Amino acid sequence: MLLSLRNVSKSYVTAEGPLEILKGIDLDLNAGESVALTGESGSGKSTLLHLVGGLDYPDGGQVLSAGRDIAALDDRGRAEYRRTAVGLVFQHFNLIPSLDVAANISFHAKLAGRHNPAWERQLVENLGIQALLARYPEQLSGGQQQRVAIGRTLAARPPLVLADEPTGNLDEATGDAVLAIMLSLTKSAGAALLMVTHSSRLAQKLNRNVHLSGGKIA
Ligand SMILES: Nc1ncnc2c1ncn2[C@@H]1O[C@H](COP(=O)(O)OP(=O)(O)OP(=O)(O)O)[C@@H](O)[C@H]1O
């Protein structure tokens, strides 16, 4: 199993007291599988994605990556997990403003020790961003930035791609096209995808759909 969540719980401390967001989540994801995570606003979708991405800690339960509990990793292990085991595509693309598109694409791949120019050329071609390689992020439209962000994540060949509303700020046609590219490229990379979306229409394009409600997966 690529990813297993076992009885994962998470609360936030607020002025009104603790706010229980996740109340015992169990979820399994196989290699190469694509899963849509839906749920109402505030149901904890982003919280769950952050736990899987190693960006935050659960209060209880386990997040197992290939059988290894990521909460038990030390700082170094956690940094390595983030660098090599997962790739993030969020709505705010976090492209590096001082690097051109070509350098943004290869940045994470180099950090992960997986820089592969032939694979990067293939991604660039499939994403239709050949003409943009010398541009800087601020010179791109939202849809173009999103395609670069997808290319940058996939260039590093993470076994698991985590996407939070990756097409949320694109118009429907562009969003559909970007999602189709993302699905086909994650598939050809053999990667699994866990994608948060509000849209049941988009969710249906993935292998499986899980719904978060009342802190549990329905
Ligand atoms: N750092 C934090 N401190 C306190 N409360 C938080 C924190 N982060 C998130 N929350 C609260 O936890 C709940 C779940 O937030 P989360 O962002 O995971 O929801 P979501 O399902 O992704 O929502 P949306 O669909 O609106 O993005 C919300 O009520 C939110 O206000």
Image (spheres, grey):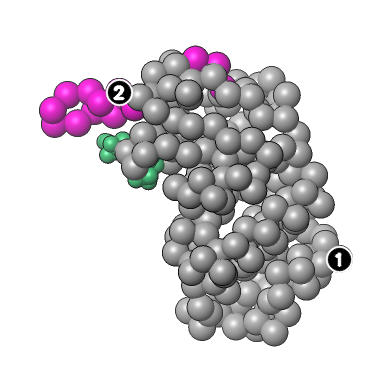
* Image point (70%, 53%), residue name: 183
Say which label, 1 or 2, has the lower sequence index. Answer: 2
Q: Which residue carries the number 2 mark? A: 20
Q: Is residue 16 magenta?
A: yes
Viewer-nearest residue: 69 or 154 = 154
Question: Is residue 153 found left or right of 202 in the rendered image?
Answer: right
Taking the image as four quarters, which one is ligand 1 found in? top left
Where's residue 16, x and y in %?
A: 13, 28
Question: Is residue 67 found left or right of 12 in the rendered image?
Answer: right
Q: Quadrant of the N terminus?
A: top right
Mark 2 CB within 8 Å of ligand 1: no
* Image point (64%, 35%), residue name: 208
Which contiguous range is marked in magenta?
5-21
Q: Quadrant of residue 84?
A: top right
User: Dot 2, how many residues are within 10 Å of its Cα: few (below 14), some (14-19), or many (20+)?
Assistant: some
Q: Give the answer, above or below, for where 120 lies relative to 190.
A: below
Mark 1 to mark 2 CA distance (whole Å)? 46 Å
Magenta stretch, overall SS? strand
* Image point (55%, 64%), residue name: 175
Q: Secondary structure at mark 1?
A: helix
Q: Check disc 2 and give the amino acid type.
A: Glu
Q: Check disc 1 and give the amino acid type.
A: Ala
Q: Which residue carries the number 1 mark? A: 118
Where's residue 20, x and y in %?
A: 30, 23
Q: Does any portion of residue 44 appear in the rendered image?
A: yes
* Image point (73%, 50%), residue name: 186
Q: Is residue 102 magenta?
A: no
Where's residue 3, x and y in %?
A: 65, 28
